[in-house]
Image: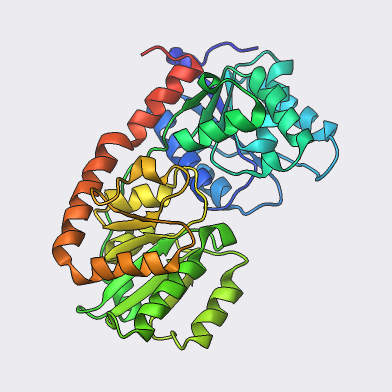
């Protein structure tokens, strides 16, 4: 059943429970790219009826995904049977699941076929919302080869919630392969002048991403007469968009705020920016923040989750308390007023990203967990 693929490589099934262009999904695409480059066979296993972004990414890379259907609520034996059939038919060597649902069902399928199973949790906390969820994930974790959190904060919380020994949960930081963007196209599109500073935030428009905190901070700065020469561009989509647009209208910020929706040109958006802001209330280890640091952009972010493992306050970025729009406004004012500070933080941030958060380092760690000798 688990014969190793040609040339000593592995057939690795990457299970996802969603499909959109969020951080976990982008990490999986980076992971898949590097595994392919190293000669492994990558088998994406994705749910039907979801955003097609990730499926399209893998199709473009010559890895059409296997699909499963799942229902909400009670135990879904039909879903489990689908996963078992996929693993058996594709002769999978390693099952790598991401987040709660696939870690339970994909983990069960792997156990039935005696296939090594690796779990990665990216920081989503809904597994802790009920005792039955915690019990299911604990059962899967105890039967897996490895349990991974993408940050020390995520790993510690996971161990606490599941009642696992802390050393049972490993940390593998997310990694990025940086892209070079062009500064001009997005600034021209938005009409940003040379003397205007563009603040960029990238992320799904969910309450936890707290884009409204960023808008409140900037609105207060404008009301107080500070730094009139700024714009902000928010790239992402989600249920918070109407509330964000309503705030923009209420505070007459239409000339300053651009809500871009989904964008595929993130490298160009980062290149167009002068400051990158991440006001999140909770994070695992955010890909977008690492991408901004690779792009040599000064970052200001919330001191929450795994973010302090990426950014050291005052060294390679600025950190503020989550949800504190006054502190965020103070930090932005410092960055707006001090070009030398922006340059120093951007340079240090890029160095930090290159040293610690490259995709090669991440995949080296996962290959060891898969049983690939180094």
Viewer can see residue 176: no
Residue lying at 51% horizontally and 63% vertically, measured from the top left: 210
- 335 lies left or right of 119: left
At x 53%, y 87%, the residue is 250
Left or right of 267? Residue 78 is right
Placement of the C terminus among the 4 image quadrants = top left
* Residue that protrudes farthest toward the left in the picture: 340
Tell me: residue 23, above or below residue 332.
above
Q: Nearer the viewer, residue 143 or 47?
A: 143
Residue 61 point in image, percent of width and height: 47, 41
Q: Position of residue 88 (x, y in %)?
A: 69, 20
Q: In the picture, residue 373 is in which quadrant?
A: top left
> Where residue 99 sits: x, y (%)?
61, 37
Describe the colour scheme in one phrase: rainbow
- Up-down: is 192 above or below 295? below
Q: Which residue is drawn at 30% across and 45% down?
A: 312
Return the residue nearer the eye: 152 or 51.
Answer: 152
Q: In this view, does 359 lie to the left or right of 349?
A: right
User: Residue 156 placed where, x, y %?
Assistant: 52, 31
Q: Quadrant of the N terminus?
A: top right
The answer to which of 197 and 55 lies nearer the viewer is: 197
Q: Report the number of numbered marks.
A: 0
- Tell me if I can see residue 12 in this picture: yes
Q: In this view, does 57 lie to the left or right of 183?
A: right
Whether residue 278 is situated above or below residue 54 in the rendered picture: below
* Residue in the picture at 35% in, 43% down: 310
């Amino acid at each position: 059943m688990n014969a190793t693929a040609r040339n000593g490589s592995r057939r690795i099934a990457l299970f996802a429970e969603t499909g959109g262009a969020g951080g976990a999904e982008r990490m999986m695409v980076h992971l898949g790219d590097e595994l392919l480059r190293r000669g492994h066979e990558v088998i994406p296993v994705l749910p039907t009826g979801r955003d097609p972004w990730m499926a399209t990414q893998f199709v473009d890379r010559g890895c059409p995904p296997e699909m499963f259907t799942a229902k909400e609520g009670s135990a879904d034996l039909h879903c489990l049977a689908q996963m078992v059939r996929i693993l058996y038919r594709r002769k999978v060597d390693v099952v790598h699941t991401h987040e709660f649902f696939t870690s339970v069902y994909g983990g069960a399928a792997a156990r039935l076929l005696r296939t090594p199973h690796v779990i990665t949790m990216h920081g989503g906390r809904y597994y802790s919302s009920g005792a039955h969820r915690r019990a299911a994930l604990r059962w899967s974790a105890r039967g897996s080869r490895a349990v991974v959190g993408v940050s020390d904060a995520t790993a510690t919380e996971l161990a606490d919630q599941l009642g696992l020994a802390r050393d049972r949960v490993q940390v593998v930081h997310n990694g990025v392969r940086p892209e070079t963007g062009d500064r001009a196209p997005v600034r021209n599109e938005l009409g940003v002048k040379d003397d205007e500073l563009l603040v960029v935030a990238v992320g799904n428009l969910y309450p936890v991403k707290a884009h409204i905190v960023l808008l409140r901070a900037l609105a207060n700065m404008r009301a107080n007469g500070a730094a009139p020469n700024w714009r902000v561009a928010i790239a992402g989509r989600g249920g918070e968009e109407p509330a964000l647009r309503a705030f923009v209208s209420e505070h007459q910020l239409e000339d300053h705020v651009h809500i871009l929706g989904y964008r595929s040109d993130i490298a160009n958006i980062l290149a167009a920016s002068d400051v990158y802001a991440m006001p999140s209330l909770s994070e695992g280890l955010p890909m977008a923040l690492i991408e901004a640091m690779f792009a040599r952009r000064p970052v200001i972010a919330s001191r929450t989750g795994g973010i302090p493992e990426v950014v050291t306050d005052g060294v390679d970025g600025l950190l503020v308390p989550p949800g504190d729009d006054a502190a965020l406004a103070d930090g932005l004012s410092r960055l707006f007023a001090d070009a030398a500070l922006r340059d120093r933080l951007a340079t240090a941030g890029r160095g930090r990203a290159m040293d610690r958060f490259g995709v090669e380092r991440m995949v080296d760690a996962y290959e060891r967990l898969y049983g690939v000798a180094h």
